[in-house]
Amino acid sequence: MFFGGPTYTLIHVLISLAGILSGLIVMFGLLGGKRLGGWTGVFLATTAATSVTGFGFPFHKLLPSHVVGILSLVVLAVAIYSLYSRNLAGGWRTTYVICAAVALYFNVFVAVIQAFQKVPTLHVLAPTQSEAPFKLAQLAVLALFVLLGARAAIRFRAPVLAV
């Protein structure tokens, strides 16, 4: 079933922005060694909703956006499992951080694509999204998330138990 339409698009965009905003809050929490439970729930739910609602737009063939949506849902499933089923025990703690960072990256990756398609100033710079400004923007986003994810994985360590 396809929904499309301006209202559906607005809802999808608002959910996506909520996913990005809550994801950034969660990421900065992880960088500070904090879990931020409520924000984490919002991030995981809105990011999953972003991917799911992305499939509600009309399409006739599998598109790159669908592949990103599928990958995002897989990464989110592992993050949710790591957090809620494995309780961040052992290596699941690092797995969670990496999956959360990748899920947030996917949201920002798509937001950059949308920005270059919809914002006139950006669209002029890269009308086909094969031009240098687009590639540099995506490379900068990737580098930022590799750095953030690696630092968060290092800083979000298991608490040391007193003996």
Image (cartoon, rainbow, N blue to C red):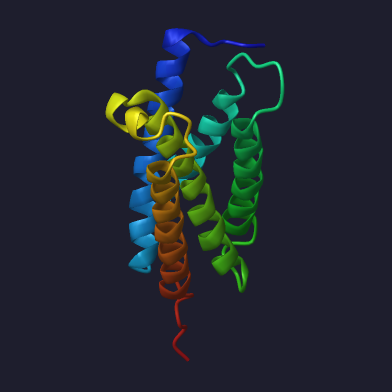
**Residue 139 versus residue 76: which sits nearer the camera?**
139
Q: Does residue 160 appear in the picture of this structure?
A: yes
Q: Does residue 38 appear in the picture of this structure?
A: no
User: Would you say 136 lies left or right of 56 here?
Assistant: left
* Residue 60 locus on image (x, y percent): 70, 16
**Residue 28 versus residue 146: which sits nearer the camera?**
146
* Residue 27 locus on image (x, y percent): 39, 56
Q: Quadrant of residue 7?
A: top left
User: Would you say 68 lies left or right of 17 here?
Assistant: right
* Position of 5 relative to 163 (above/below): above
* Position of 69 relative to 75 (above/below): above
The residue shown at (59%, 64%) is 95
**Residue 138 versus residue 76: which sits nearer the camera?**
138
Q: Could you tell me which quadrant the N terminus lies in?
A: top right
* Residue 65 locus on image (x, y percent): 59, 32
The residue shown at (62%, 11%) is 2
Q: Quadrant of residue 42?
A: top left
Q: Residue furthest top?
A: 5
